[in-house]
Image (cartoon, rainbow, N blue to C red):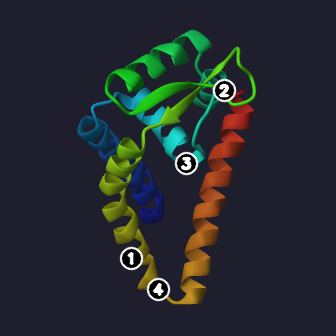
């Protein structure tokens, strides 16, 4: 196996370890952490949309939301245009807490990228894009 491929594998392992550590810091399991990531990035979501994004049943999404509400990461609010439904809203303090935990890593990664010139950054970006595309293609084949 090529060293770059080994490093991609190692990156996925370290990323999983980092996500587990982040989950411990935020007092959530892996699925709840993924839900939080969607809420932080997208804002309010319906439980149905959250279930779709997590690829879980709506019943399982209800359990995720229950846990996020219980630990103070989210609230349920009436949907702004559909009085029969609710949306899951990330709590601002929780978003701050998650971002405070993530920002040192994001800044560190950006600093590493800043060490490369524009052409090198373009090559790195192209390589990573092709890796993402290869993963997506494999996922589509498996579906």
How far apart are the alpha carbons under marks 1 and 3?
Answer: 24 Å
Which residue sits at x=34%, y=30%? 72
Which residue sits at x=42%, y=29%? 32
How far apart are the alpha carbons under marks 4 and 2?
Answer: 46 Å
Q: Which residue is mark 3?
A: 41
Nearer-the-camera pick, 126 or 31? 31
Which residue sits at x=32%, y=56%? 100
- Asked if residue 110 shows in the view, the reply is yes
Nearer-the-camera pick, 65 or 122? 65
How far apart are the alpha carbons under marks 3 and 2?
Answer: 19 Å
Q: Quadrant of residue 16?
A: top left
Which residue sits at x=44%, y=31%? 74
Q: Which residue is mark 4?
A: 116
Task: Where is residue 117? Give x, y as percent.
Answer: 51, 90
Drawn side of residue 14 relative to residue 140, left or right:
left
Sequence order check, earlier mark of 3 and 2: 3
Q: Which disc number belongs to residue 112? A: 1
Q: Is residue 14 above or below residue 35?
A: below
Drawn side of residue 74 relative to residue 24, left or right:
right
């Amino acid at each position: 196996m090529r060293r770059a491929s080994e490093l991609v594998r190692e990156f996925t392992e370290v990323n999983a370890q980092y996500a587990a550590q982040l989950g411990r810091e935020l007092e959530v399991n892996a699925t709840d952490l993924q839900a939080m990531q969607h809420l932080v990035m997208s804002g309010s979501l319906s439980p149905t949309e959250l279930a779709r994004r997590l690829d879980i049943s709506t019943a399982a999404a209800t359990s995720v939301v229950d846990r996020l509400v219980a630990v103070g990461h989210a609230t349920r609010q009436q949907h702004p245009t559909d009085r029969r439904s609710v949306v899951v809203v990330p709590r601002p303090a929780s978003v701050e807490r998650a971002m405070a935990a993530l920002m040192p890593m994001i800044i560190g990664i950006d600093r590493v990228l800043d060490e490369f010139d524009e052409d090198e950054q373009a090559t790195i970006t192209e390589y990573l894009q092709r890796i993402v595309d290869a993963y997506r293609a494999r996922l589509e084949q498996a579906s």
